[in-house]
Amino acid sequence: MSFSCFPTLHAVRQWSNVPFLTVPLARAHGKSFAHRSELRQAKRIVVKLGSAVVTRGDECGLALGRLASIVEQVAMLQNQGREMMIVTSGAVAFGKQRLRHEILLSQSVRQALHSGQNQLKDMSLPVLEARACAAAGQSGLMALYEAMFTQYSTCTAQILVTNLDFHDDQKRRNLNSTLHELLRMNIVPIINTNDAVVPPPEPNSDLQGVISIKDNDSLAARLAVEMRADLLIALSDVEGLYDSPPGTDDAKLLDTFYPGDQQSITYGTKSRVGIGGMEAKVCVQAHCVKAALWALQGGTSVVIANGTHPKVTGHVITDIVEGKKVGTFFSEVKPAGPTVEQQTDMARTAGRTLASLLPEQRSEIIYALADLLTEKREEILSANKKDLEFAINSGRMPASMLKRLSLSPSKLNSLAIGLRQIAVSSQDSVGRVLRRTRVANNLDLEQITVPIGVLLVIFESRPDCLPQVSALAIASGNALLLKGGKEAANTNRILHELAQEALSVHNVRDAIQLVSTREEVEDLCRLEKMIDLIIPRGSSQLVRDIQRAAKGIPVLGHSEGICHVYVDHEASIDKVLKIVRDSKCDYPAACNAMETLLVHRDVLRTPLFDQIIDMLRTEQVKIHAGPRFASYLTFSPSEVKSLRTEYGDLECCIEVVDSMQEAVDHIHKYGSSHTDVIITENEETAEQFLQLVDSACVFWNASSRFADGYRFGLGAEVGISTARIHARGPVGLEGLLTTKWVLRGDGQTAADFSEQGSMKFLHENLPVAQPLTGQRTSN
Amino acid sequence: MSFSCFPTLHAVRQWSNVPFLTVPLARAHGKSFAHRSELRQAKRIVVKLGSAVVTRGDECGLALGRLASIVEQVAMLQNQGREMMIVTSGAVAFGKQRLRHEILLSQSVRQALHSGQNQLKDMSLPVLEARACAAAGQSGLMALYEAMFTQYSTCTAQILVTNLDFHDDQKRRNLNSTLHELLRMNIVPIINTNDAVVPPPEPNSDLQGVISIKDNDSLAARLAVEMRADLLIALSDVEGLYDSPPGTDDAKLLDTFYPGDQQSITYGTKSRVGIGGMEAKVCVQAHCVKAALWALQGGTSVVIANGTHPKVTGHVITDIVEGKKVGTFFSEVKPAGPTVEQQTDMARTAGRTLASLLPEQRSEIIYALADLLTEKREEILSANKKDLEFAINSGRMPASMLKRLSLSPSKLNSLAIGLRQIAVSSQDSVGRVLRRTRVANNLDLEQITVPIGVLLVIFESRPDCLPQVSALAIASGNALLLKGGKEAANTNRILHELAQEALSVHNVRDAIQLVSTREEVEDLCRLEKMIDLIIPRGSSQLVRDIQRAAKGIPVLGHSEGICHVYVDHEASIDKVLKIVRDSKCDYPAACNAMETLLVHRDVLRTPLFDQIIDMLRTEQVKIHAGPRFASYLTFSPSEVKSLRTEYGDLECCIEVVDSMQEAVDHIHKYGSSHTDVIITENEETAEQFLQLVDSACVFWNASSRFADGYRFGLGAEVGISTARIHARGPVGLEGLLTTKWVLRGDGQTAADFSEQGSMKFLHENLPVAQPLTGQRTSN
């Protein structure tokens, strides 16, 4: 379709110095959103593209991929039924590019006519007049937008405005009704200042001053309020608002900004050099903020974000609309509690005090929490009842999840018993000396266990997870951020209050923080340098999602449990039946359940094999045949699609191998290094299997279901890890600890031990079983 | 500039069924490139965009961002002086979109005229004729390309061809000379089949068959050879060639494909459903491969890659031209050695045997390597001389690097001594029992140390790193991939041969592999699931680069060492002067050198402080003042830009604190958790500092330079880690080990221990100091 078939406004009028915002606003149209998560409801959205987004640094070539991706997102949102408007910069840069080229061409033609000699190199390009550039660029810029939007069956219309269009009531009404008409027709208005008629640049101002970025910011704000937009997204090349100048030691990007806090902002310089001197930039950001505040006052929510960052540009607009933590969100309503960043800071500080307590003191806290679980039983159960009722009324929760959500007096009792066990085991976790070396005379080295720092534990439905994980964190001296599911919000809240009450015993109340259910897991996974370890507790899907989302923060856990049981030809019938049944059927959804049964070829035509099949049939286990096994059968059950499948249900694969070695090879090729079992009466075969299989857990004549922290005797379980660094297999308290090296000397230097030095290394190992050092209370 | 000012070829001629490639090629123009790294030299490049790249699945909206990014890359390469040509699909999809819209419009107009009632919902869209779509889409597609290329000041020209244009000699010459003329004029030709005149689709063939993707592949190949292009990049929605059907358990993407291997390919189905049935897809890929082989035979190198992958599209073309491992590279020359993937496989297999040897046997290998360093001294030194001469002749290597590159008899001697120390310490590394638990009667659990798996060690210039790292890997039973710098290629080669010779003693020659210098570090860092741990040994820049490049593989190391020395007001003058001098001046470039000196306020106006300053001046240390310190001075030295600076040189920052606690806070806020020191005579203050500071190494009255594996008495050092999981601080052999859990039972199941079960857990800790189990030789 052609551009000209839609109304196009060239609101070219006389220029004026009056900024867009000086005209008093008729009225605010309502309340802006209080929280990012509400941005999903935004229907009418203004997207402002700063010149940094549309142009590329000094080269002034358009950042095509960036622009295309923005168009794609805007079109997508428009096709969702939202009403999108774009306020764009860039015509000057666009035209500069074009005019340069034309001048070069005309110069070279002139040259060819006049001299015939190659003097191209000597020719310098004239300084291009900005308004000429703007005029030359406007048509190309619009053509580009139109060509791009057409690909999404989205129509655009061009609107050129000046300050004065808002100053004059009649003009304003005209513009207003035109824009409404366009939105009604499902057309995306693309609004630009009419650069050709704006004033020339001030002396000492840079070329791009003509675009009047300031005016572009305020234009967008003005339009957003005038059109009663729900959201204004202002994209430039700054990440958002910082509490100190970006680049300085303390600068932190503000996730949410409240107008009441305005005095606390330092308007920083931008990270990229682009447009003019230092002061101009500060000014730009200040003005941008002013425009944002003005829009907010008018009832439009605002997000300021970076539209030039290559990694995020692909989603910056849609991410903002989905409520993700991108840039700075302007909100009128300051939430009651601290932000998650503040919670993390509070937790780290209190956690350091927790770590410096005596082990007995940490135990006391855990005992106190265990007692509270019994004392406050009524409150807990009544909060849990609320969650349950809500879940039942919503009618969307399956029975299995309801069961996990529900607490009972007996569940609370066993929870309290478990906590008291953790209290006992916490006695020698932190500050344990692992290694003690006399490096030289009067120079002693100790390696001691210390907490990891700040843990983030993300758990689903089961609220009993909260006191358990809290006890583990307390025992290991770690600070803890808890993120529970919405469905258990009431139960989690009271349990968290009890944990903090227990922590208060030793004045470290803030060491455990419950994150608001409104926070997105994905955003939490990005808090690099604030969180040291993420522990997902829930489905393997949850673990996978978090492993994918975590940027630069290690995640403890396994995403797959493809466990094998290998039945050797020298296996005992009884043991095979017992172990295979238990491994598959005890709890088929567990990660340590058997997925593939490997059978020695010689077992195949024996009564044992028939008994195995009979047992699996009785237990209603669906059998899939591996290719080798299928080839032995006349009527084969369904052949497996992949030997690398985690069924997580009453299903398993059976495959045939020629030998123990072949079983090992199969496990290495298709397994997930979680838990693998051999059943045999031949000790030598068993020991070889135990040695050769490279998995976190390798068992001989025992069910794969033993791969579990509690069954291993580790006390409470943090999780099971299939990683090859840090903790591996079932992880107890140990997995929440790291070490630190403490050296005590009396003035020694490295030079003392050089060839010219006077000292020699002893490196004498000292016994570690001595009283703990460095464990004093600091409060 | 306008499109029409440049020659545009509409080579519209009669259609023909003759495929492009049946016409015999006049002659091949030379040899294709033998290795990806040579692709940088490609001058003339044909980029083929399959319909999957240009259109988006079934929606047929153009994937605008994707296309924009491709245009950006092509324009960039063109501006580098290369001659780029594009063979594009997409006009049909483009036109379909447009025609649908027009039909909808005209229908609704008709409807408005005839009935006035809303019957829009009942109207179904007609099936659009493909050739009409092609004709309607062509102009829009070209306009889009032109609008995009214009942003990079790059001109395009449209060429429409049919098979017959290549069949007729005269037409071929015409086309050929037109294309050459365009390239000469720095114009990017955009070539498309003339869909409007090609035959109608076959029965049962899908709509898009009209585009004749097959012909598009062969068209690109034909053009590439005809125009003597150096490289053909064929982009579609498959990753490249697999050795088995993609999605099956064994499928591996081929990095490089040699025509001689053709019989081994399985033409897989594509991952995305897009165009027609299963067979069509297999056929497409087969035809694509055939076209690629044909081009290769004609002397044009070919890379087939995925142009739709959102993460890589941004760079797919430039990455290919830079020689990175993207898609499948077609090469005529099969390199002599194995690929790096094959090397990794070989290393893992041999590594597993290495791990199953007796500790004494691993020691023997290390002793053998130590002996070889002395025995083969002459060969080593002569290889080293070659590297040195080359480095000196190139004249680009600074003296400090030459020194690190050069070996000497004494260096080799001390290297051999170090190796023998590792041999000793290797005795109890693998298979050590860390924990032994009696879970129940006849159910015993052991946690034993095992190797991590396959290590990748990346090291710069210093060739002595190779035997050292090899010995560490052997001692810990790990497989090892070594990637050394080009500058030490000869030395590394002989040292690696010696390592393999030593490994042959126990038949595990392949456990250590030297990666070709041609492999890109970045590509190696992407070998997820093949490599378990990456250890960079070299500058902190190297570490940072590798941490950034590593995807899903843990990296051992620290990228920053911002170490503090805190001088307490109760410090001894002598110790302060000694320790501060040593910490800063012993080796300023080291990561454990002091960067910030924290001074208690009370020290400030004392003679001690003057002595510190005098000492630093004598040592020519440049002093930067922290903001607090600066405020005390009348004439302050330059104030620091950031308190988080790693100078790595004879420079340091001085800052004033009020108390030990403030020093700790400063360290937590600005430090990198590497090594921090307190100097004081007050034991209580010292112990509090040691306890409170949360760094990998915390020292009292000792130089920060002691933070080192050798000085700590760990024997050989793997590196220093500031991570909070796995190893922390100086890392010895321990850091190369993980653990595995071995459970030995006699048929127990989890059900036996349930409430209804007959057994009870004992969880009794057994002493660990018993003979090693599971350590049998398997070969």
Image (spheres, coloured by chain):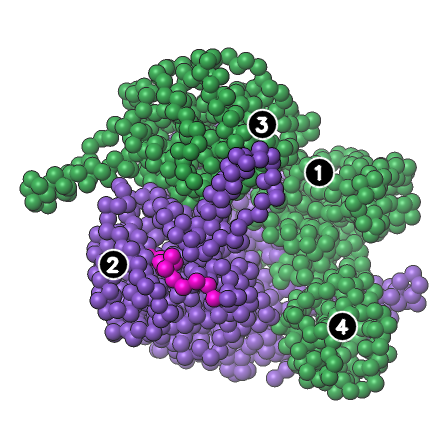
Chain colours: A purple, B green
Q: Secondary structure at mark 1?
A: loop
Residue at the image point whose x is 52% and y is 25% from the top? B180
Choose top left, top right, bottom left or bottom right for residue A756. bottom right
Which callout, 2 or 4, points to the residue nearer the camera? 2
The residue closer to the viewer here, A233 or A63, is A63
The residue labelled by disc 3 is B230
What distance separates the C-alpha of mark 2 from that of mark 1? 62 Å
The residue labelled by disc 4 is B623
What distance separates the C-alpha of mark 4 from that of mark 3? 56 Å
Answer above or below: position of A313 versus A452: above
Magenta residues, start to end: A191-202
Counting other residues with Cα less than 10 Å from the Cα at mark 4, is it few (<14), some (14-19), or many (20 or more)? Answer: many
Quadrant position of the C terminus of chain A in the picture: bottom right
What distance separates the C-alpha of mark 2 from that of mark 3? 53 Å
Q: Earlier in the sequence, mark 3 or mark 1?
A: 3
Q: Amino acid at mark 4?
A: Ile
What distance separates the C-alpha of mark 1 from that of mark 4? 42 Å
In the rendered image, residue B221, in percent from the top left (x then y), is placed at: 50, 23
Whether residue A420 is visible to the viewer of this picture, yes or no, is no
